Amino acid sequence: NNKMTVICANILDFVDDPAIAGESAHRYFEKGALVIQNGKVVKLGYEQDILPSLNKSATIIRHDGKLVMPGMIDTHIHLPQTEMVGAYGEQLLSWLTEYAFPTEKKFTCEHYSKDISNRFLDELLRNGTTTALVFGTVHPQSVDAFFNESQKRNLRMIAGKVMMDRNCPDDLSDCAQTSYDQSKALIEKWHNVDRLSYAVTPRFAPTSTPEQLQKCTQLLEEYPDTYLHTHLSENKDECEWVKGLFPEAEDYLGVYEQAKMVRKRSVFAHSIHLSERELCCLGDNNAAISHCPTSNLFLGSGLLNLKRCEEHGINVGMGTDVGAGTSFSMLQTGNEAYKIQQLQGQKFSAFKGMYLATLGGARALDLEGTIGNFNVGCEADFIVMDYAATSFLKFRIGHAKTLHEQLFAMMMLGDDRCIEQTYIMGKSVYKRDAKEQFSTTH
Ligand code: GUN
Ligand code: FE
């Protein structure tokens, strides 16, 4: 069916990084129109220019006074940690053994994997997140369940089975060969099927033997358009541990570099405590960082210096890192990102936050032109945001004088309640329940 749909609203998207390109980085159409056909964007402009030129058969959907933006992109999140968000009291390494590993053991069960996958996808869509780069568990069935449920919903998702063959509980451990075999079978089954892509997913250097990292290299060479998804330089004790485990490596990133893992479509979560050499290596090789502000504060991991990332030309996206991250909301993630830059005396505009949550994420995932903005040909995954989501937000934004002030107030005060509707490939898949709208207070 090639009927046209036209979305009328205030429309915002990004064509570049506002920290580099300034005002020309964003496009804003007050009383704008977004034209969609076959699930893709065919036109973006002002309503007054677009509506008169349209065929009479086009369906017009009005979201007057609301803000339409591209769907949010979460570049680092853990499916199995959905039920343990907000686990008390530990920093990374003891948090893993106390909380993360025991929860991940439950994914031996296929029913459980399916239940959590649906809960997780519901939560992403409720928060306006339409694409995510997702850690499964060591069990291939975690990824099978996740891809199955994502496929039913026609979502663009990237995921992979965790590879982990040391320094973890026995019942969460694979070995170099089985991790290779299982990952390969999942790639053959799911990679590039509908809107799904596979990410080779060694958990992080401490939980992989050099033999297992070699197997990652082999997978990436056999399937060059798969992703590489792992953690890097999150916590100081972790960094010391890596030095001890890989004494011959130049630095933490050097471990991954030796295994030829630093390349386009490689996404390194956290990447906080990096040397000049490591930053250059990421930039020169077109690799990406997933910035995870709520997690980095929650686990007390440290403060990412975004300005240094910009100076090194590194692609940066934002990640919630649920369950070390404390919210599925990319608005709340932007809120904490702002405070992390404040603690370092640096600016972080609402434009930068919204950019990182959309086009920045698409660039980090090498998907610019497919998702992340409303360029012609992009897939029509988008959200309708409500400035009046709560009575206080409505009051506060009523006092905002500029677009930036409105967006900033939404980023500071907003969360899932601001997401009125989520569309996938031009079709509405989530609509906020009006009864729930005022049921919680901030
Ligand atoms: N490093 C290795 N595994 C994990 C994890 O599950 N969460 C976080 N935040 N960091 C990690
Ligand atoms: Fe993580």
Image: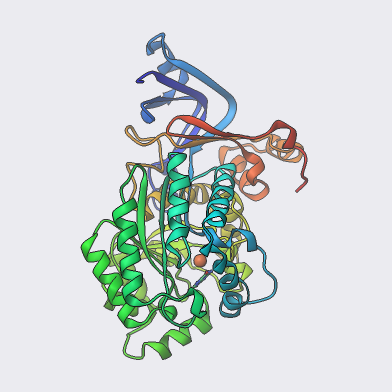
Report the number of numbered marks: 0
Please say if 122 is above or below 232: above
The quadrant holding residue 308 is bottom left
In the depicted structure, whether residue 330 falls above or below residue 57 = below
Q: Quadrant of the N terminus?
A: top left
Task: Report x, y in % for residue 382.
Answer: 48, 36
- Residue 344 shows up from this direction: no
Tell me how the rendering is colored.
rainbow
Q: Is residue 67 visible?
A: yes
Residue at x-position 54% and y-position 58%:
320
Instruction: Point out residue 247 in the picture as x, y percentages from the top left corner.
Output: 36, 91
The answer to whether residue 54 is left or right of residue 404 is left
Task: Answer left or right for 361 relative to 324.
Answer: left
Q: Observer-nearest residue: 163 or 59?
A: 163
**Which quadrant would residue 127 be assigned to in this image?**
top right
Residue 435, compared with residue 292, is above or below; it is: above
Q: Residue furthest top?
A: 56
Residue at (63% x, 68% y) in the render:
298
- Residue shown at the point (32%, 85%) measured from the top left: 250
- For the point 37% across and 12% down, which residue is it? 53
Instruction: Provide residue 292's location: percent of width, then percent of height.
Output: 52, 62
Q: Position of residue 195 (x, y in %)?
A: 36, 43
